[in-house]
Amino acid sequence: MKRAYSKINIFNLPYTFFVVFGIINAKIYESEKLNFSTYLKLCRQNLHFTQKDLVSELYNFDAAFRGLDVNALGRWERAITKPSISRQVKILEYFFEKLDYYFPFLEMDSIPTIEKQFSTKKIKKLLGKHKQIVMSFPTKRAENKNFTITLAHESSNMNIAFSTTINICEDMYGPDMCNTEKMLKEFSLSPRSLFLVCEYKKQYFGHCFFICLKTEAYHKIMTFQMDYLDISTTDLALDGEDGSYLSVSLFAMNEKALALMFIRFYAYLILNQKTITHIGALVSEEDAVEIATNFGLKKVAKEDDLIAYSGTIKDVLLTEQIIKILFSPNDAPEG
């Protein structure tokens, strides 16, 4: 088959995602979203550390904590001051190294629980502008509760999502460069696939399709040794084995719909982190390069007008942008 990469851009492979995560199994306070000061104290207490213990641990973990003392840590926990965002990243890196969990001691045992930690407004800023794949249908006053994110095979709008994917792809690239509806349906039924449909008051409002590839197929895609259209169901990861998520289509009626789908995607990644390995992206548009960078991905290969971006789960989750989104900021100065 003729290589399709030169004609497939951000619309059909908007930013192919591949990730590695682990299951979180501790406690969250359901009353309100945690800020970093409260979360830091929660982690320390669950580890049965005194403030002196944690200061010593952090001091030995990274040079960024040279000079840290109990008084400074106490001020962080009381939200009198707060660690710099770079130190927040290092603190979460320490907890991951200690416990092998991203964001430990949050009871992230369900999608809705995880989604409460995210801000739709901030995710919208992280995603940026996408004129080709995001419309501007007005829902300024629409409440989030009127939006639903559903798996495609459970949605009454599944066929609309598939036909939208195919029609736009064919219009932009021609029928030889697009998945068939039959293949999309086969991909969507794989247990590891994440084919999301966004609905507003039960009406189709967008979709975000991801397939979970076996590691070997992922690396071939990211190094341009394998054509995207050559992917078959035999390349999909099975339950229980490591896999990498590839985005096969994305469209949204407005930025809010896009943000809500990505919040669901992140919640899914966090919940299933133990069986996902990398996040990657094949991009050809400037705004797609920006979003790949914002999500912690780095350039690894280039062919024709496509650039491959990739990152580990640590690269993707433990970024300054995501930490700012997950943990409500407070007005305390850094110190």
Image (cartoon, helix red, strand yellow):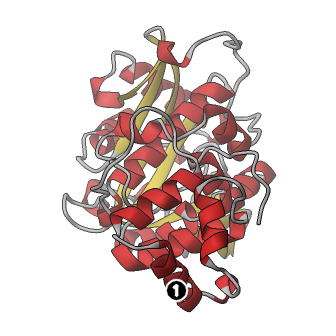
Residue 40 left/right relative to 100 = right
Q: Is residue 78 visible?
A: yes
Task: State which quadrant residue 80 falls in.
Answer: bottom right
Whether 213 is drawn above or below 148: the answer is below
Q: Nearer the viewer, residue 263 or 92?
A: 92
Q: Nearer the viewer, residue 57 or 325?
A: 57
Q: Position of residue 143 (x, y in %)?
A: 57, 13
Q: Nearer the viewer, residue 55 or 284?
A: 55
Q: Nearer the viewer, residue 267 or 150?
A: 267
Residue tagged by mark 1? 56
Image quarter in which the C terminus is found: bottom right
Q: Position of residue 69 (x, y in %)?
A: 64, 79
Whether 325 is drawn above or below 246: the answer is above
Q: Residue at x 38, y 51 (%)?
A: 106
As shown in the figure, which amino acid type bears the numbered disc 1? Answer: Ser
Q: Number of labelled discs?
A: 1
Q: Residue at x 56, y 48 (%)?
A: 326
Q: Residue at x 68, y 44 (%)?
A: 127
Q: Secondary structure at mark 1?
A: helix
Task: State which quadrant residue 49 falls in.
Answer: bottom left
Residue 46 left/right relative to 77 = left
Q: Residue at x 50, y 55 (%)?
A: 39
Q: Position of residue 214 (x, y in %)?
A: 32, 67
Q: Position of residue 184 (x, y in %)?
A: 37, 39
User: How busy is the neighbourhood of tag 1: few (under 14 within 10 Å), some, or many (20 plus)?
Assistant: some
Q: Is residue 179 visible?
A: no
Whether 148 is drawn above or below 213: the answer is above
